[in-house]
Amino acid sequence: MGNIGPENIGNAPATLDGALQDFLRAAVALYAWDGALYSRLLTESAAFLNLRTAQFDGTNGPVSVRDGSSDGRPSTLLGLFTLAEDHDWNGASWDRHRGNLEATVLASAARTGDTNSADQTNYNAKGVMLHLNVSAVGAPAGSISAINIQAKDPVSGAYLTILAFSALAIATTGYRVFLIYPGAASAGAFTAAPLQSVLPRTWRINVDHANETDSITYSIAVTYEN
């Protein structure tokens, strides 16, 4: 089959430059002289969504990076790196783990009445930070009286408010931050409302306007917090 070893290819030590080390954080490395072994590893890894392979030619950098289902190999193949990525099964497909993602929930627009966002998907965060930016108000000014976090019933599709920032009376321009996280406490720069549990997978934002005639222009973005 040829020589296989975690530390060297033949008698030549394997070295990695900084960029490759960043790419291969917590990687599992397999070095092989034998092309048949390389092809077998690609074939076996094709069945797993969390495997990626990088071909290494001994020049301190990967020749190419590809899914395990890809075929072909460089003529100077000296090594193969197989990476494991963290996935969770959601009942229908695999979810990759996310970091602190940012997303626009409501784009900036002038609104006069109560507004619901589209459904949001929380993959693995415990809470979320809301970024409310009011850029204009009408004359007379519209007013935001509450921002509600609503969970969605996966069976009926009904929504229920599980947490509310109420009595806000926001009728002036400015950037405001609201934090929703287990055990969170308010500070001078933001208002917090601690969840008793965690943020549900499917949820939305409901914005309650104090009246249905006067305009206020705002956007809401979120940052998921792990």
Image (cartoon, grey):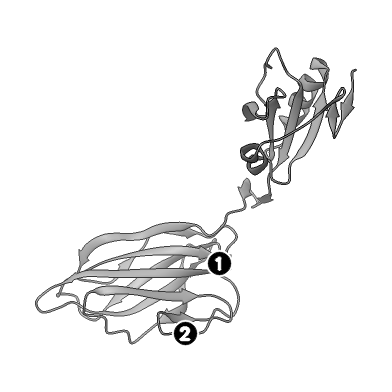
Mark 1 Cα shell of 10 Å, populated few (<14), some (14-19), many (≥20): many
Q: How many labels sit on residues?
A: 2
Question: In which quarter of the view is residue 10 placed?
Answer: top right
Question: In which quarter of the view is residue 222 placed?
Answer: bottom left
Give the residue number, with chain letter if any, for mark 1. Answer: 200
Frontmost residue, 77 versus 166 = 77
Q: Which quarter of the figure is the C terminus placed in?
A: bottom right
Image coordinates of residue 69 in percent, x first then y, are: 67, 26
In the image, farthest residue toward the left: 139
- The answer to whether 215 appears left or right of 64 in the picture is left
Question: In which quarter of the view is residue 126 placed?
Answer: bottom right
Above or below, 206 relative to 168:
above
Q: Are marks 1 and 2 in contact (CB under 8 Å)?
A: no
Residue at 47% across / 84% down in the picture?
Answer: 186
Image coordinates of residue 56 in percent, x first then y, are: 70, 26
Residue at 21% across / 80% down in the picture?
Answer: 171
Residue 192, numbered circle: none
Residue 118 visible? The answer is: no
- The answer to whether 185 appears left or right of 136 in the picture is right
Residue 217 visible? The answer is: yes
Q: Secondary structure at mark 1?
A: loop
Residue at 51% across / 63% down in the picture?
Answer: 224
Q: CA distance from mark 1 to mark 2?
A: 22 Å
Give the residue number, with chain letter if any, for mark 2. Answer: 186
Residue type beneath disc 1: Pro
Above or below, 215 relative to 102:
below
Residue type beneath disc 2: Ser
